[in-house]
Image (cartoon, rainbow, N blue to C red):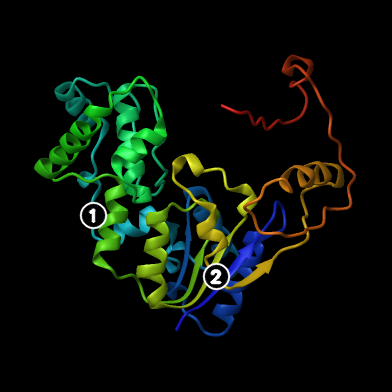
Amino acid sequence: MSTETAIYGPPGTGKTTKLLSIIEDAIADGVDPQRIAFLSFTRKAAQEAVDRACVKFNLDQKYFPHFRTLHSLAFRWVGMKTEDVIKPPDMRFLGKKLGVVFQKEEKINIEEGDMFTPGSSDGDKYFYVYNMSRLKGTDLMDEFDSFGDMSLKRAYMPTVAEAYQDFKNKHFKLDFTDMLIKFLEQGTGPDLDLLIVDEAQDLVPIQWRMVKECLLPNSKKAYYAGDDDQCIFNWAGANVNNFLNCAKESIILDQSYRVPYTVWSVARSIIRKVKTRKQKEYKPKEEEGNVSYYYDAMDINFNRGEWYVLART
C-alpha cells in the first residue's frame, strides 16, 4: 500500500530543493531513477526539476523519463502522436461551419500541456466552457451558467459541443483534455518506487483522478508538493480543497530564503484573511526589505532594476 505525504512550501522555502533531497535519498537507497516520477502542472517546473536532477546526480536526462507534465505523461503513455492533436486550422474550419470565430491558437506543444485559457472571440468562449466541464467533471450547462457571459447563446452551447466532438471523431483528432481522459480510461501507469507531484495546488479534478486512480496504485511512496496560498488557477478548474485533502501526513517548510521581513509581514496580514487554507507559519529571511505604496504606476521609475508586475484582470 502506498504512503502519501503533502509538502507545503510557502514562497522561497526551498520546495524544489526538498523534493530533490527526497529523490537523492531514494537513489542512495538503490532506487532506479527510471522508477521515479516528478510530475507537474507546468512544463517550467518539470524542466527545472530534471535539469537540477541531471546536475546533482551527474546523469543524462534519459535516465529521468518520468520527469514531465501530466499532459506529457498521458500523451506518451497512451501512445499518441503529434499528428493526432487537433490544430488551429481545424478549429478555424469548424468555426466556419458553426458560424463562430475561433481566434485563440492553442500551442501544439505536448510538453507544455497548459490549460486552455478563454480568448475574446465567441468560439473561444464556447470552447472554454466545454473544456472546463470536461476538466472539472461538471454539467455542461451548469458550467455555461457559471461562466456568465451574456454575449453567448445558451441554446447554442450544446450545438457547439456536439459539433466539436463529431469533428474530432470523424477526423480521428484529440485535444489536450482528451489526453487526460484517455489516460484515465485505460487505468494504468508506470511502476514507480517514488511519485512526486509538484504544483499540486493547481491540478484540476481530472488530473487528481489521474494521480489517485492510475498512478498511486502503482507507486510505493507519493509526495504532493505545493502551496495552497498560491493557488491562482481556480479560473482554469483548480480546486484548492483537492490539495488540502490529498494526504493525512504533511510536512511544512517553515523558513523562507527569499522573502524579506517587511514583505513577509504584509503578505501574512493579507493571507490570514483567506478562510480555506492550511494554517501554517513560516519565517522570513533576516533582510528587512521594503514595501512602498503608490497610487499611480506612472510614479514608479521602471528604468532601474528588474520588475515583476502583477495586476488584476
Residue 96 visible in the shown view: yes
Name the mark on residue 80. Answer: 1
Badge 1 density bin: few <14, some 14–19, many ≥20, Cα 10 Å = some
**Amino acid at dot 1:** Met
Considering the image in quadrants, where does the C terminus appear?
top right
Name the mark on residue 247. Answer: 2
Name of the residue lying farthest toward the left: 170
Residue 65 visible in the shown view: no
SS for callout 2: loop
Q: Which residue is at a point 22% across and 46% down the rendered structure image?
A: 174
Badge 2 density bin: few <14, some 14–19, many ≥20, Cα 10 Å = some
Q: Which residue is at a point 42% across and 60% down the rendered structure image?
A: 208
Q: Nearer the viewer, residue 201 or 297?
A: 201
Residue 207 picture location, percent across and down: 40, 57
Q: Nearer the viewer, residue 21 or 54?
A: 21
- Earlier in the chain: of badge 1 and badge 2, it is 1
Name the mark on residue 147. Answer: none
Position of residue 41 relative to residue 96, above or below, is below
